[in-house]
Amino acid sequence: MNFKESHLLILTNVSRFIDLSELEKQKYISLLTEVKVEKKDFLLQAGEVAKYEYFITHGCLKVYTIDDDGAPHISMFAIEDYWTGDLSSFMTKEPSRYYIKATEHSELLGISRASYDLLFQEIPKFERFYRILYQKSLISYIRRSNQGISLTAEERYIDFKKKYPQLVSRITQKDLAAYIGITPEFMSKIISKVNRM
Amino acid sequence: MNFKESHLLILTNVSRFIDLSELEKQKYISLLTEVKVEKKDFLLQAGEVAKYEYFITHGCLKVYTIDDDGAPHISMFAIEDYWTGDLSSFMTKEPSRYYIKATEHSELLGISRASYDLLFQEIPKFERFYRILYQKSLISYIRRSNQGISLTAEERYIDFKKKYPQLVSRITQKDLAAYIGITPEFMSKIISKVNRM
DNA sequence: GAAAAAAAATGAACTAGTTTAAGACTTTTA
DNA sequence: TAAAAGTCTTAAACTAGTTCATTTTTTTTC
């Protein structure tokens, strides 16, 4: 069976943790929905229930909240070969507090809540896949929430640059500031300082 | 079969997400190790590999790092009916950067890495248990790391008090400051301000 | 490819949170 | 139960990061 490129990408991602038979691969692919968004399009807006979890086959998106003062706070950037969505709203079916917006033309594979539930019944191995996926995400969020309180903004910027060098050139300074947790003005100061060093 | 109180506690916790047969329950319990620690004892120290993940049947512990300036940063408090450990070190078998210290006399059930791996072979249902457990933890860490950058220290304190009212009276103000991400002096100011309101 | 819109830089005045230091209160330990 | 150690409070001087306002540079749009 020949899979298209985006399907091969997600199958390769899944195969990092579990092995699927040809039949299981086809079954899995059949549960996915293709989604394309243009730059600035929303995949999700606060107030909506998150109907899908997404795997990104191409592009870049930002996941963020808007606080009471209207300031955005980016909780993650998501690029090719990563997963995104609002897991909380997806699971509880309560309205989301997040926006997910494409920062470039992006292509994704979405799985609906019904398909997600069905997946575990049909291919129980996916419990293992998600167990490992969530475990790894959890480890990096624990680290991030710890760094948020123990590092200065400058240290967080240097750390981000070291960890995601490709990303720095793909996102605006303003968005990076909203991720690091500072104002764009202070981000600008940090960058010119760090570059001078 | 009669289980002892601590075993009943962990079985009840596990039964929130999966159903186990009597035989599976016995098998599971056989993989656990009982641990007791006195106040101020360490369950783990930075530099060691985390040999166990723990379920707390009684007591309270703090999980923290010490930064380059010697300042502690608490990443979680763990009490009865919660899980704790350094998942990153436990999985990678690399030395931990965390300390886990009892803030009261505590009793725990530990599972070693070998038993954890065996558990999935013997009772695959545990993939589901951990998938759901990690999913829920992930959701709360995503929320926490977002709040860390979007709320002021005062807002984080008020939020903590609302969310974990029982805990506030069980931990010192100093430890709460190390969790919130501020100095004990500023914590003291916030508390006297909030109490005056 | 010109006009409009958004992002980035810079600087001055401000504020949330830190540092240092000292005294009062509470808990632990011998 | 006294003394030692740790925790909490208060206050003054300080600094990391914000706010607001203006100009320059880059990107988007028609």
Image (spheres, coloured by chain):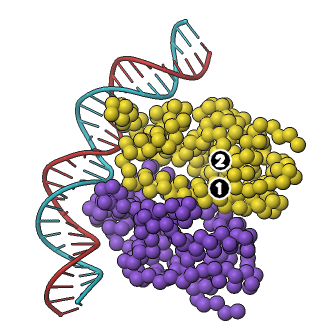
Chain colours: A purple, B yellow, C red, D cyan
- Residue that label 1 marks: B133
Residue A105 in view in this figure: yes
Vertical side of B40 occupied by B90: above or below: below
Whether callout 2 and callout 1 share a subunit is answered: yes
The local secondary structure at tag 1 comes to helix
Q: Position of residue B146 (x, y in %)?
A: 44, 56
Q: Which mark is residue A28?
A: none
- Residue that label 2 marks: B83
In the rendered picture of this protein, how many numbered marks are placed on residues? Answer: 2
Kindly report the distance in space between the C-alpha atoms of the residues bearing marks 2 and 1: 9 Å
| Crowding near the residue tagged with mark 1, few <14, some 14–19, many ≥20 C-alpha atoms within 10 Å | some
Residue sitting at x 86%, y 50%: B22
Residue sitting at x 77%, y 42%: B8
Residue sitting at x 70%, y 70%: A120
- Mark sitting earlier along the chain (2/1): 2
Which dot, 2 or 1, sits closer to the camera? 1
Residue A143 in view in this figure: no
Vertical side of A143 occupied by A20: above or below: below
Q: Position of residue A139 (x, y in %)?
A: 58, 58
Residue sitting at x 60%, y 42%: B78
Q: Amino acid at mark 2?
A: Trp
Tell me where residue A14 sits by quadrant: bottom right
Tell me where residue B149 sits by quadrant: bottom left
- Is residue A8 rendered to the left or right of residue A170? right
Vertical side of A138 occupied by A165: above or below: below
